Amino acid sequence: MNGPAFNKVVIFGVGLIGGSFALALKKAGAVDCVVGIGRSQASLARALELGIIDVIGSDLGQALAGADLVLIAAPVAQTEAILAALAPYLEASTIVTDAGSTKSDVVAAARRALQGKVAQFVPGHPIAGRESNGPDAAIVDLYQGKKAVLTPLIENAAPDIERVAQAWRLCGAIVHRLSPGEHDQVFAAVSHLPHLLAFALVDQVAHAPDSALLFQYAASGFRDFTRIAGSSPEMWRDISLANQSALLDQLDGYLAQLTQMRASLAAGDGAALETVYANARRARQQWIDAIETAEPAAPN
């Protein structure tokens, strides 16, 4: 590679997701200048101090001038406002992508906000995260060997899609493609519903009359099941509402499963319970085996 792949990258949201993206591109020698934009001046100053970004973008026009790539790494409910704000300054050579956990709503927002410039927006979603937030949570290898899903628009030019894919590969990610609808159905089942359940369980225990006693004896099983309840409430509020229809479908299915298991428990039907437990154990082991062997870590 002759020089960096990207001269200037602008990141809206310099916390875990956006900050890790910047750090990974820098480690790969793939970017010359990273400009950070966000709601919190304190977070931007901290990102600058940590070397995550090179410049704080205080003027949107100046920040976007000459930008090769813009990443929106903010809560999904903010996507439309951010796109509308940057649209007047968006140069023809600049590609915009996002890291939102829902895609159908983001695509609709992009069409409203960008209108004739929507072809420059390539939707994306890196499948990686931690429970920590803010610039201090950013780590250089967050995306190493992880999936990054792109959900391209029919208007997107193939070279623009490849440019976004290249950025994620430079971060160490393995790039996949889905349609926006497929994406939202899949992640309602394997990400959004588990987060909802973890939040619900911790909230239930916290509201119990003997909550202090319950938490005193909660151990590794409770910790492991509820780990993701340490995630950002604002972010998961937005994701839940943005993917409401698909999440409701998954929640209804889960409620039906719980109802059946409750009936088995009430009837003392150990065989029925064991069947569910055994099926779940077998399916989980097959999943673990598959993800451990299917995809090697992508080289930087």
Image: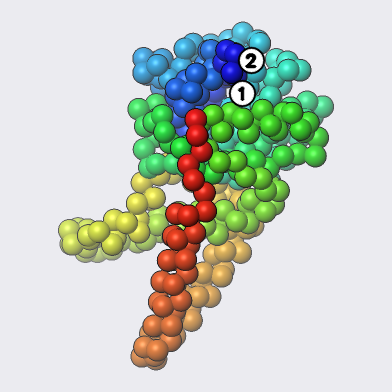
- Which residue is tagged 1? 70
- Which residue is tagged 2? 67
Residue 269 appears in which quarter of the rendering? Answer: bottom left
- Would residue 89 be seen by someone viewing this image from the given angle? yes
Q: Nearer the viewer, residue 278 or 136?
A: 278
x 49%, y 45%: residue: 296
Side (left or right) of 263 relative to 214: right
Amino acid carrying label 2: it is Ala
- Would residue 72 be seen by someone viewing this image from the given angle? no
Q: Nearer the viewer, residue 205 or 74?
A: 74
x 40%, y 77%: residue: 277
Amino acid carrying label 1: it is Val
Q: How is the image coloured?
A: rainbow
Q: Is residue 231 above or below residue 266?
A: above
Give the percent coordinates (x, y) of residue 195: 45, 54
Q: Is residue 74 above or below residue 238?
A: above
Give the percent coordinates (x, y) of residue 237: 50, 46
Side (left or right) of 186 relative to 114: left
Give the percent coordinates (x, y) of residue 208: 28, 63
Q: Secondary structure at mark 2?
A: loop
Tell me if mark 2 has few (under 14), some (14-19) or many (20+) residues whose alpha carbon lies within 10 angstroms of its own: many
Tell me if mark 1 has few (under 14), some (14-19) or many (20+) residues whose alpha carbon lies within 10 angstroms of its own: many
Residue 163 appears in which quarter of the rendering? Answer: top right
Tell me the quadrant of the picture where the N terminus can be found: top right
